[in-house]
Amino acid sequence: MPVPLPSTTGAAAVPLVVLASAALHAVWNGLAHGLRDKLAGFTLISLASAGCGAVLVCFAPLPDPAAWPYIAASAALQVAYQLLLLRAYQLGDFGQMYPTARGTSPLVVALVSTTLLGHSLPAGRALGIAVISCGLAALALADGLPGRTQLPALAAALGTGVMIASYTLVDGSGVRVSGSVFGYIAWLFLCQGLVLPLIARVRRGPALLTTLRPLYGRGLAGGLLSLLAYGLVVWAQSRGDLSTIAALRETSIVFGALIGAVVFRERLGHRRITASLTVLAGIAVLQLAAG
């Protein structure tokens, strides 16, 4: 029988770790969106994941057999997430696609974790999650409702959010039965990192290597940041409440809004500022409710 990971060790550090993960997540997404050839960029990010995973599995304890179905399911969901996010970035603007994708997740996680997994959700935490989600929705819609031509991009972004919620729930359960956070992360990186490069190779053929060459630096940097961001949040999931962590992760939207304004010269405006402050207010409510 797997030994559950201790839920109290390092629990005080969980909020700071998740916020650091959120900032790193926004940065790597900004790098990915800024690449002209986004398929090539996401391929390099996946190769970085597979490469790091291949190294880590040499040193990490083997996860308990009970964790392998979770690893396989999470890997499949993360590949779907990458493909949907790639499509959203090909069709839409960073300032709208990123918050839409990230903002969908907390409500889905809260709903599923309470109705299907039986996790408790006290009124204070529910209020905090609701406030954060409202702020994220306001960020996504700060420039008005999307037009008909933007609907495919919006659908891809919403689908991305559903995938985020799905693998968050899978990993939150899987890492607790794995017996080793390190081993779970290592094998997950390796398994999910191999799939997108294979898909890109089928689509592009031998020309893929030529398109990858100019993007090595930024693509691999984005991949390493992605690995660090997700490794931090999986560690946090082994020690904290899933709904709280999922909501705190969505503060990456605030960082994303700043990146959009500073790096991509997108208009921040009073609506986005107000929405960002709403997200921060929700975080405060969430933390007060958690004690």
Image (cartoon, grey):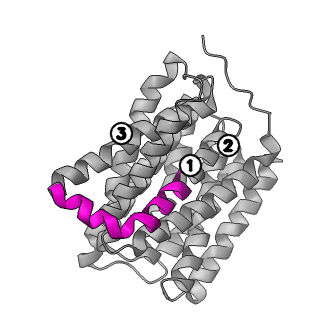
Residue nearest the observer in this picture, 206 or 165: 206
The residue singled out by tag 3 in the image is: 76
> Within the magenta stretch, is there residue 29?
no
81 to 71, vertically: above or below:
below
Instruction: Give me the disc on residue 230.
Output: 1
Percent from the top left, x then y, of residue 32?
42, 67
Q: Earlier in the sequence, mark 3 or mark 1?
A: 3
Which quadrant is home to the N terminus? top right
Q: Give the residue displayed 24% in from the left and 77% down from the top.
A: 149
Percent from the top left, x then y, of residue 91?
29, 72
Percent from the top left, x then y, of residue 211?
26, 66
Q: Give the residue displayed 46% in from the left and 67% down from the top.
A: 218
Q: Earlier in the sequence, mark 2 or mark 1?
A: 1
The reply to whether residue 170 is in sight is no
What's the CA distance linking mark 3 and mark 1?
16 Å
Q: Give the residue displayed 55% in from the left and 72% down from the top.
A: 256
What's the CA distance linking mark 2 and mark 1?
10 Å
Region rendered in magenta: 206-227
Instruction: Give me the disc on residue 258.
Output: none
Q: Earlier in the sequence, mark 3 or mark 2?
A: 3
Could you tell me if the residues under marks 3 and 1 are in contact, i.e. CB atoms within 8 Å? no
In the displayed structure, does residue 96 sit left or right of residue 214?
A: right
The residue singled out by tag 2 in the image is: 236
Disc 1 marks a residue whose amino acid type is Tyr
In the displayed structure, does residue 208 sit left or right of residue 16?
A: left
Q: Give the residue displayed 82% in from the left and 45% down from the top.
A: 12
> Within the magenta stretch, is there residue 211?
yes
